[in-house]
Amino acid sequence: MNIKDLSEEVETISQIYSKKFDIGRDGNWFVLKLQEEMGELIQSYLMMIKQGRHKGKSPEEIKDNFRKEVADVFSHVLLLAKFYKIDLEKEVEEKWLKWKK
């Protein structure tokens, strides 16, 4: 699956979520939701490196949660880019992949 197709799939799920919980999605929501997900990623990372409370979770549960939080952050980056009509493939090419040359 390419980034554009994945973005469409994530957008569909985000629309379902927003309708279910009556959430208005605007520019502020996309940025703030990404920040919220980053906080959850950091919390799970701290648990994984034993710098945060484990909340009764096993090491494998903590690692699994960390992986899921990375997926959440990635998905919200896709949503933010889609909302602002950012071509991520183009931007990554120009910002990162130019260093291959």
Image (cartoon, grey):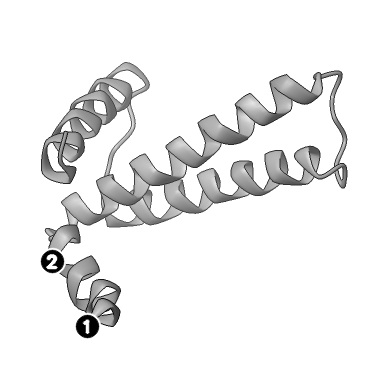
Residue 74 seen in this snapshot: yes
The quadrant where residue 81 appears: bottom left
Question: So how many labels did they put on this image?
Answer: 2
Q: Which quadrant: the C terminus?
A: bottom left
What kind of element bears circle 1? loop
Camera-side residue of 17 and 93 = 93
In this view, 14 is above or below 4: above
Camera-side residue of 2 and 25 = 2
Q: Which mark is residue 90?
A: 2
Q: Which residue corresponds to the image point at 62% horizontal and 48% vertical from the top-left? A: 39
Q: Which residue corresponds to the image point at 15% horizontal and 40% vertical from the top-left? A: 2
Which is closer to the viewer, label 1 or label 2? 1
Q: Which mark is residue 49?
A: none
In this view, 16 is above or below 54: above
**CB contact under 8 Å: marks 1 and 2:** no
What kind of element bears circle 2? helix
Q: Is residue 43 left or right of residue 80?
A: right
Q: Is residue 5 left or right of residue 69?
A: left
Q: Which residue corresponds to the image point at 70% horizontal and 44% vertical from the top-left? A: 45
In this view, 13 is above or below 43: above
**Where does residue 50 sit, x and y in percent of width and height?**
87, 42
The residue to which callout 1 is attached is: 101
Q: Amino acid at mark 1?
A: Lys
Q: Which quadrant: the N terminus?
A: top left
**Where does residue 66 sit, x and y in percent of width and height?**
62, 35
Badge 2 local density, few (<14 within 10 Å), some, or many (20+)? few
N-term mark: 1 or 2: 2
Report how far apart the C-alphas of labels 1 and 2 lie in the structure. Answer: 16 Å
